[in-house]
Image: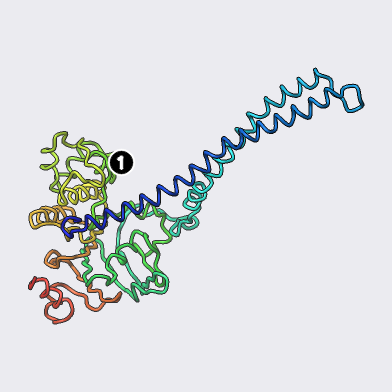
Amino acid sequence: MLKAFNAEELQSKKFAEENRKLFHIKNKVNRRRDLGSPVSETLGIIAVCCVLWYGGRLVLGHGNSYGLKPGDFLAFIAIFTQIITPLKMISQASYNIRNGAASIDRIQYLLKEQETIKDGTNPKNLSSFNSCIEFKNVTFSYGDAVILENISLKIEKGKTIALVGSSGAGKSTMADLVPRFHDVSCGELSIDGINIKEYSLESLRSQMSIVTQEPILFNDSITDNIKLGKHDATIEEVMEAAKVANAHNFIMHKEHGYETNIGDRGSKLSGGERQRLTIARAVIKNPPILILDEATSSLDTESERLVQDAINNMMQNRTSIVIAHRLSTIRHANEIIVLRKGKIVERGTHDFLMRQDGFYKKLVEMQEVK
């Protein structure tokens, strides 16, 4: 990227400037730290000299009322010299404590962060999904900005609902409300007729799997990344999920097969391979509800076909909420919800919306032109 925009020199200067600032800061810190030892040594020597001078005068004046016996003086000197070293150590410890205080403050700030989404008192257990997901006059805001406004929608079990609209219309936010990544600002979101706030978060989220636009993977083996969806899964279950996700073949071509480490965020895999692993992770959980957030938007044609086939396999007999980037992939959805500026402006099947000659038809035609 830097070479493409001839930005090597600019970034090199920025890097050198940051290094220069860091160099000067570290030098100041090190100078102050290094001055501590010679200063404390000098003060220690001065203190010893003062004690020797004053104590010597008292010993020499032993005959008067303020005199000091030589034996007592030597005992005092011995005790005094033993105290100096611990005092120096206390000084060093004080420096280390102050040095770590800033780090402790930052860590405590993170630890004290309050969870905004939490279980209510005596939450119910959502053991199965039986009926429908329903949005009732739902409004959601980030601060003063209204993202979704007065959304009403009923998603029957086994149906596929597609959310479409331009960027920033509120599609992802609407999908994020179902697993309670956010809570609605107004209105009610219910599953099987019960407000989702009454369910425990664990039981609520156990009923759904999510495939995001950007695959989120960990620096671990392929097996362990897939088993994140079901921690006690057997290798046979892992392989079956990979086959449903069209991932088994490319996995078997890896040097270590399912035990291959995929690198940080899956850096050793292609975009299509990463996405198919996230689909396998969703499949192995075998949830009744699927949330697919533009899962094919950043893939090439061949990878998109494989991923779309995997998604179609996964969606069979499940309730699906699909956020679509390529509208051709959601033509067979039971209902298409068209969002614009946080509001539902159109809804219906693909054929119905195309006959309406509205916003959805314009989106389809724009993609066909591209």
Q: Nearer the viewer, residue 124 or 263?
A: 263
What element does badge 1 sit on?
Answer: loop
The quadrant holding residue 322 is: bottom left
Residue found at x 37% / y 70%: 140
Which quadrant is the C terminus positioned in?
Answer: bottom left
Percent across and percent down for residue 222 are 22, 40
Q: Quadrant of the N terminus?
A: bottom left
User: Which residue is under mark 1?
Assistant: 231
Residue 230 appears at what percent x and percent y?
Answer: 29, 43
Farthest residue in the bottom direction? 357
The percent coordinates of residue 238 (x first, y second) are: 21, 40
Left or right of residue 275, residue 27 in this image: right
Q: Residue at x 47, y 58 (%)?
A: 120
Chosen colour scheme: rainbow
Residue 301 visible to the viewer: yes
Q: Is residue 89 above or below residue 217?
A: above
In this view, 17 is above or below 150: above
Determine crowd level at label 1: few under 14, some 14-19, many 20+ residues with C-alpha closer than 10 A.
few
What is the total number of numbered labels drawn onto the structure image?
1
Left or right: 141, with 286 as reference point: right
Q: Amino acid at mark 1?
A: His
* Front-lying residue, 291 or 154: 291
Is any part of residue 192 visible from this angle? no
| Residue 226 locus on image (x, y percent) | 24, 43
Q: Quadrant of residue 47?
A: top right
At 29% from the left and 55% from the top, the residue drawn is 13
Depth check: give the residue in front, 152 or 82: 82
- The answer to whether 135 is drawn above or below residue 206 in the figure is below
